[in-house]
Image: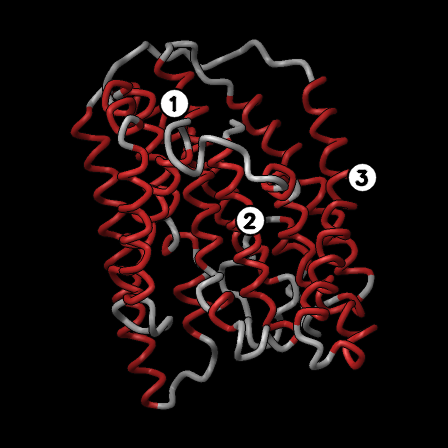
Amino acid sequence: MHKPGLDLLRAIAIIWVMLFHSFVVGGLGPDYAWLSRYGWMGVDLFFVLSGFLIGSQVLALLAAGRGFGFRDFYLRRAFRILPAFWVVLAFYMAFPTLREAPGLEPWWKFISFSLNFNIDYSQNKAFSHAWSLCVEEHFYLLFPLLAVGLTRKRSTALCVGVGVGVLLLGLALRSGIWLHDTALEQSGAITRNWFVEDIYYPTWNRLDGLLAGVVLATVKVFRPQAWQWAQARANVSLLLGLAVMALSFWLFRERVGLLGNSIGWPVMSTGLALLVLAGAGDRSWISRRQVPGAAWIAAISYSLYLTHKATFHVVQSLFGAALAGRGEIAFAVYAAATVLVGALLYYTVERPFLRVRERVPRFSGRLPVQPTAAA
């Protein structure tokens, strides 16, 4: 789904994440720290986009009664995610000097997409940003199964109940873990980075953004009149989204605090979902015309995400002394190198495999589902 607004949001997401990860090379300095402070939210913007786009694909098939081809879906996701990921992982394994941190979790945790469970973050930070791919893969694996099951039940109340249950479960888990680990930390019984390991990385704590995106997709597919009504007021959604994001900034003013890690996640995901709603049509200020370069950055965003930390590290290793204190020049060099490496991976690995994917015959066997208007 290529929409100018969605391309812009995807480009903002990856740039925001890379600005946040500038801590790998010492940060942007006090004058530009505001650019990176909340950059970790870019990952949640990716989650909302993924929930909306994947949710729309899956639910549109089910709503039309065309059935769902699990083989086709998983194969297409594999061609999309695995080749570039495996190439980057191979470089991390084979060339330790490329790593932005010395320690690396065992290879099988990356291959099995279990990195975000029980990671030793204090010792193994290299390529740890692959945790978000684990969350995405778990979503790809489980959401179609859940969607098919709920569509067969044809119950709006059940669908709403599942969504509310996921939301409340996240609130309860994060709050309980925060209270438990904080007490252990204060007693001296825990010294590890429990926030990252127990709250920030595990899939069950990071479903808010995916859920928000799926809710948007559900409305679009099963309630088209409501979707059109919202699209006619897309700029209202845009402004509301910005306001809700301002509230989430306040809630997360202490990133590891209880307030943010209880209600902050669903509030932030709601704000991001409103922005995606505004970008998904053609009536909002961000969706009426393409921002120059945004579509290209959006296209290579996955390759940028995979490679940016290692690129930062290599540039610092080679030119760090010369760039120290150079401000905008240093920023430009790091940015140019990151885009160059990301584009190289995209054009040599990611895009060729996407083209191969389009030539793979579709499997005709589909799980039949009766058409339904139930959400």
Residue at image location 31% in from the left, 47% down from the top: 241
Residue at image location 30% in from the left, 45% down from the top: 239
Question: Which residue is tagged 2?
Answer: 133
Distance between the Cα atoms at labels 2 and 3?
Answer: 21 Å
Helix, strand or loop at mark 1:
helix
Say whether residue 273 is left or right of residue 160.
right
Residue at image location 19% in from the left, 37% down from the top: 161
Percent coordinates x, y for residue 29 in the rendering: 57, 78
| Farthest bottom residue in view | 188
What numbered label is drawn on residue 330?
none
Distance between the Cα atoms at labels 3 and 1?
Answer: 32 Å
297 or 75: which is nearer to us? 297
What numbered label is drawn on residue 59?
1
Percent coordinates x, y for residue 360 in the rendering: 70, 18
Going from the N terminus, do you reach mark 3 or mark 1 first? 1
Question: Which residue is tagged 3?
Answer: 348
The three-letter code of the residue at mark 3 reads: Thr
Going from the N terminus, do you reach mark 1 or mark 2 first? 1
The three-letter code of the residue at mark 2 reads: Leu
For the C terminus, which image quadrant?
top left
Cβ–Cβ below 8 Å for labels 1 and 2?
no
316 or 217: which is nearer to us? 316
